[in-house]
Image (tube, rainbow, N blue to C red):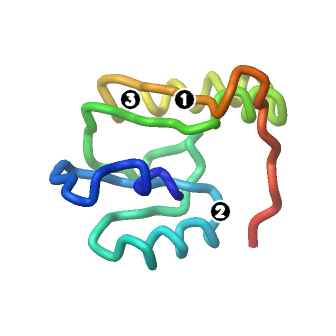
Amino acid sequence: GRLLTLLPKEWVGGYLGVDLCPDFVRIAEDDYPDRLFSVGDLRDLSHVQTHFQWTVLISIKKMVIKNMGDSAWAKMEKELRRVSDRIISLEYNEHDEGEVIECK
């Protein structure tokens, strides 16, 4: 939900932020009320009706594989490829595998 903080304020392209954690989505909506955010699971993006040129993931792939397994990542990647032309996956560093935190 904090991805948009990496984009310039003057960004004019379309944007949809998706996060599994409702708290993160609320924070993003408060910070950027003119952007679209959605609570959702990347394994099922059937609620996404728009096709995007890019999907940008930040510290997601390694965390998903570590905590949920390769099959969960495969489902996410398939859905992301369905709704976008390209995927860029950025990790914080090569050793950071992240962790799943509990959301309300």
- SS assignment at label 3: helix
> How far apart are labels 2 and 1 at the CA level?
20 Å
62 lies left or right of 37: right
- Residue 71 is situated, as x and y percent measured from the top left of the image, at 72, 23
The correct choice, above or below, for 75 with respect to 33 in the image is above
Report x, y in % for residue 93: 68, 27
Where residue 81 appears, as percent x and y from the top left, is 41, 25
Q: Quadrant of residue 66?
A: top right
The residue to which callout 1 is attached is 90
Marks 3 and 1, how far apart in space? 20 Å
Badge 1 amino acid? Leu
Circle 3: residue type: Arg
Residue at image location 51% in from the left, 36% down from the top: 57
The residue at which mark 2 appears reads as 21
Foreground residue among 23 and 44: 23
Looking at this view, is 2 or 8 the one in front?
A: 8
Q: Which mark is residue 82?
A: 3
* First reached walking from the N terminus: tag 3 or tag 1: 3
Mark 3–mark 2 Cα distance, whole angstroms, equals: 22 Å
